[in-house]
């Protein structure tokens, strides 16, 4: 391998690492002590997500605005998950209010742990500037027993290289993408594909 090929390979590997730094939504991690399957539940109740961010803002007015935006995102993210669950091929009964009665209910809840809207112009013009970030922990809980059935982790951040693609990456887009992946995971676990 000559030096030109070496440099090209090195640059290509570096770019792939940076491009992959946009984060992910994990697969469903089953709680090892739980005997429940997602297929056991008649109803899925999607609760609002809590605010577990730790951002420090000294200005009380700016902190209040930030807190309100995270609280609104917690409601919006739950709505997106519920909507995507209802669009699956074999949808469960989905509710946004805690159901009463004797149905077997799975509660999807969680917390937003990192929420940064970022700066569109900074991302457009400069690499490693104005990053957008959205992290959340998603918990699957047996409503009747409060037993944890499993979890999914969401870890999203805008492309660090900047440019038009990074500028288009918003917290709302990250939430929509994560909600879609969560619904896909639930659908697969509720309707496993039989191996031939």
Image: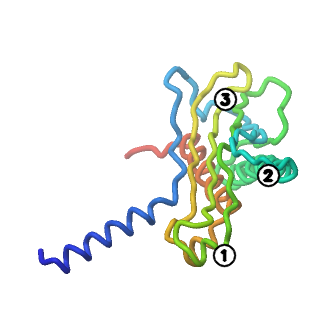
Which corner quadrant holds the N terminus?
bottom left
Q: How is the image coloured?
A: rainbow
Q: Position of residue 140 (x, y in %)?
A: 64, 34
1 or 2: tag closer to the N-terminus: 2
Q: Position of residue 8 (x, y in %)?
A: 26, 76
Determine the secondary structure under disc 3. strand
Which residue is the site of mark 2?
Answer: 66
Marks 1 and 2, how far apart in space?
20 Å
Of 195 and 55, the residue lying toward us: 55
Q: Nearer the viewer, mark 3 or mark 2?
A: 2
Of 184 and 52, the residue lying toward us: 52
Residue at image x 73%, y 30%? 105
| Mark 1 closeness class: few <14, some 14–19, many ≥20 residues within 10 Å | some
Task: Please state if 152 lies on the left or on the right of 195 as rendered.
Answer: right
Of 116 and 175, the residue lying toward us: 116
| Mark 3 closeness class: few <14, some 14–19, many ≥20 residues within 10 Å | many
3 or 2: tag closer to the N-terminus: 2
Q: Position of residue 39 (x, y in %)?
A: 60, 35
Which residue is the site of mark 1?
Answer: 121
Residues under numbered marks 3 and 1 in contact, where contact means CB atoms less than 8 Å apart: no
Residue at image x 73%, y 21%? 144
Which residue is the site of mark 3?
Answer: 141
């Amino acid at each position: 391998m000559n030096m030109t090929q070496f440099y090209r390979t090195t640059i290509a590997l570096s770019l792939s690492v940076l491009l992959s730094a946009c984060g992910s939504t994990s697969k469903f991690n089953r709680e090892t002590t739980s005997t429940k399957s997602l297929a056991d539940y008649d109803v899925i109740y999607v609760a609002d997500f809590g605010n577990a961010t730790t951002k420090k803002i000294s200005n009380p007015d700016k902190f209040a605005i930030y807190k309100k935006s995270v609280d609104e995102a917690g409601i919006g993210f739950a709505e997106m998950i519920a909507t995507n669950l209802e669009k699956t091929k074999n949808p469960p009964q989905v509710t946004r209010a805690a159901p009463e009665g004797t149905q077997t209910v799975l509660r999807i809840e969680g917390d937003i742990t990192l929420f940064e809207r970022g700066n569109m112009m900074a991302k457009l013009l400069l690499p490693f500037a104005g990053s957008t970030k959205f992290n959340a922990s998603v918990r699957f809980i047996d409503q009747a027993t409060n037993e944890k059935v499993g979890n999914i982790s969401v870890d999203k951040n805008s492309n660090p290289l900047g440019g038009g693609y990074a500028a288009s990456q918003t917290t709302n887009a990250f939430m929509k993408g994560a909600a879609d992946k969560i619904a896909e995971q639930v659908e697969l676990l509720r309707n496993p594909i039989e191996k031939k």
